[in-house]
Image (cartoon, rainbow, N blue to C red):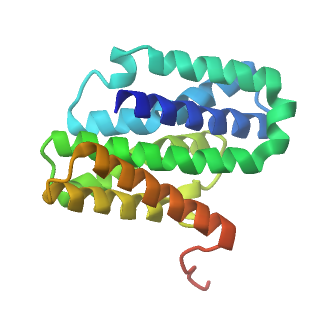
C-alpha cells in the first residue's frame, strides 16, 4: 500500500503542477499546488482517522516526490502541457489508486462500510479540491464526469470485499480497476450526472 500511495502522490502532483502552469503561477506556486494536490487527500484522511501526525509528515518521501514533480513540471511544462489528455488518463489512474489507499486505511482503522466508502472518496478527491480552491475554480469533484462518483463506487466495492474477507491485494486491485475504468469510460463517452435546470 505504501508503494501504491506514492504512485498516487506522484500522479496527482503532476496534475496539480500543470493546473498551476495553466493558471500562470510562478515556480513557488507550481510547487505549492503540486504538494497540495499530491498529499492533500491523504492529509484530510489521516486527520479524520486520528492517524496523526499524518503519513506525509512522518515519511518525507511524500513531500520530496511532490517537490521534485513540481520542479520537473516547471522545467518541462511546454512539453508536458500539450499532452494534457495523457495527464487526465494518469489522473484517472491516481484516482483509483488513492481510492484504494483510502479504503484500505479506513478498513484497518475499524470503520464500517459507509466510513470506508467515504474515506475512499475523500482520499481520492481531497487534493483536487484543495488545488481548485487555491486557483479559484469550482472543484472538479462537483461538476465533472464521474469524478467523485467513481471513487464512491470503488470504495463501496472495497467495503463489500472487506466484509466478504477478500484478500487485501484483491480488494485493492478491484477498487483501482473499477474506479479508474469508470473514470476513463466517462471521459471517453462524455458521461456525467444530471444537472439541475436553473
The image quarter in which residue 115 lies: bottom left
- Where's the C terminus, which quadrant? bottom right
Residue 163 appears in the rendering = yes
Residue extending farthest to the bottom is 197
Rendered view: 99 above or below 45:
below
- Where's the N terminus, which quadrant? top left
Q: Position of residue 87 (x, y in %)?
A: 69, 44
Q: Position of residue 167 (x, y in %)?
A: 21, 47
What residue appears at the point 22 percent right and 38 percent down from the top-left corner? 49
Residue 121 appears in the rendering = no
Q: Position of residue 168 (x, y in %)?
A: 24, 44
The image quarter in which residue 162 lies: bottom left
Rendered view: 106 above or below 194:
above
What residue appears at the point 72 percent right and 37 percent down from the top-left corner? 18
Q: Is residue 196 left or right of residue 156?
A: right
What residue appears at the point 45 percent right and 55 percent down from the top-left corner? 177
What residue appears at the point 61 percent right and 29 percent down from the top-left corner? 34
| 127 and 172: which is toward the camera | 172
The image quarter in which residue 151 lies: bottom left
Amino acid at each position: 500500500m505504501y508503494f501504491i500511495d506514492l504512485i498516487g502522490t506522484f500522479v496527482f502532483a503532476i496534475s496539480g503542477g500543470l493546473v498551476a502552469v495553466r493558471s500562470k503561477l510562478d515556480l513557488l506556486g507550481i510547487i505549492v499546488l503540486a504538494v497540495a494536490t499530491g498529499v492533500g487527500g491523504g492529509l484530510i484522511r489521516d486527520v479524520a482517522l486520528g492517524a496523526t501526525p499524518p503519513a506525509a509528515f512522518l515519511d518525507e518521501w511524500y513531500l520530496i516526490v511532490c517537490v521534485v514533480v513540481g520542479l520537473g513540471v516547471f522545467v518541462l511544462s511546454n512539453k508536458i502541457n500539450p499532452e494534457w489528455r495523457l495527464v487526465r488518463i494518469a489522473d484517472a489512474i491516481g484516482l483509483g489508486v488513492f481510492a484504494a489507499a483510502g479504503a484500505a486505511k479506513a478498513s484497518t482503522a475499524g470503520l464500517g462500510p459507509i466510513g470506508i466508502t467515504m474515506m475512499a472518496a475523500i482520499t481520492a478527491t481531497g487534493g483536487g479540491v484543495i488545488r481548485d480552491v487555491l486557483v479559484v475554480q469550482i472543484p472538479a469533484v462537483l461538476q465533472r464526469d464521474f469524478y467523485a462518483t467513481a471513487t464512491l463506487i470503488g470504495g463501496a466495492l472495497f467495503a463489500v470485499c472487506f466484509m466478504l474477507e477478500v484478500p487485501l491485494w484483491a480488494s485493492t486491485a478491484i477498487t483501482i480497476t473499477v474506479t479508474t475504468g469508470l473514470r476513463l469510460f466517462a471521459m471517453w463517452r462524455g458521461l456525467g450526472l444530471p444537472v439541475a435546470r436553473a
